[in-house]
Amino acid sequence: MNAVALRFAAACCLGSCLTAAELPTIKSGSEEWRTLYEPAFEKPTELDADSELRKSLFQLIRQRAEKIAKQPVKFQGHLRVYRNWAFFGGSSVDVNGKPVEYPELGNSDTVALWLRTLDGWKLVDFAAGHSDAFFIIWPEQYGMPAELLK
């Protein structure tokens, strides 16, 4: 092996060692491990209307929904959690409880999907005012548990 090839091989090995050492790791059995791999929701669970988690998840979609609706909105429907996933299927209503008529299709249908990560709950997908059940592909598309759709 010539000197240039040897230096290149050494640099590659050193670079890969440094990169691997810099990657974040989660130790098995740690609190982070339990949070991600032993989630609190061992079966599909409907979140109560006064649940803090339900409120915080809706806060992650409220701004988007209100931008589309051009008015303040609230959400009515089923918000279920399972493992590290949450799925909402329902409708958006105005402050008086009347259905919001989102532009284009004029209906209030609303769906959202969240995933809990190391950094907390993240919105994966959201739609408002749709006319079909396009979200039935989300288990295949995103890997969410299909049980959330039942």
Image (spheres, helix red, strand yellow):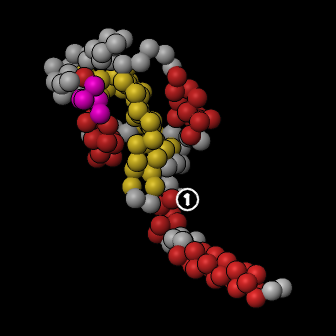
Return the residue nearer the eye: 111 or 41: 111
Residue 69 in the image: above or below residue 58: above
Image quadrant in which the C terminus is located = top right
Residue depicted at 24% across the width and 29% down the height: 66
Residue 148 in the image: above or below residue 119: above
What's the residue type where badge 1 is placed? Tyr
Return the residue nearer the eye: 79 or 14: 14
Return the residue nearer the eye: 136 or 20: 20
Q: Kindly state the secondary structure of the residue where label 1 is placed.
A: helix
Q: Looking at the image, which residue sits at the far right?
A: 1
Q: What residue is pinned by disc 1? A: 37
Residue depicted at 30% across the width and 17% down the height: 102
Q: How many marks?
A: 1
Return the residue nearer the eye: 24 or 26: 24
Residue depicted at 26% across the width and 17% down the height: 100
What is the span of residues highlighted in magenta in the rendered image? Answer: 64-68
Residue 42 in the image: above or below residue 70: below
Residue 81 in the image: above or below residue 76: below
Residue 82 forms part of the magenta stretch = no
Snapshot quadrant of residue 87: top left
Q: Looking at the image, which residue sits at the far bottom?
A: 3
x, y percent for residue 34: 51, 64
x, y percent for residue 105: 36, 11
x, y percent for residue 137: 58, 29
Residue 41 appears anywhere in the view = no
Left of 81 or right of it: where is 16?
A: right
Snapshot quadrant of residue 64: top left
Left of 150 or right of it: where is 60?
A: left
Residue depicted at 84% across the width and 85% down the height: 1
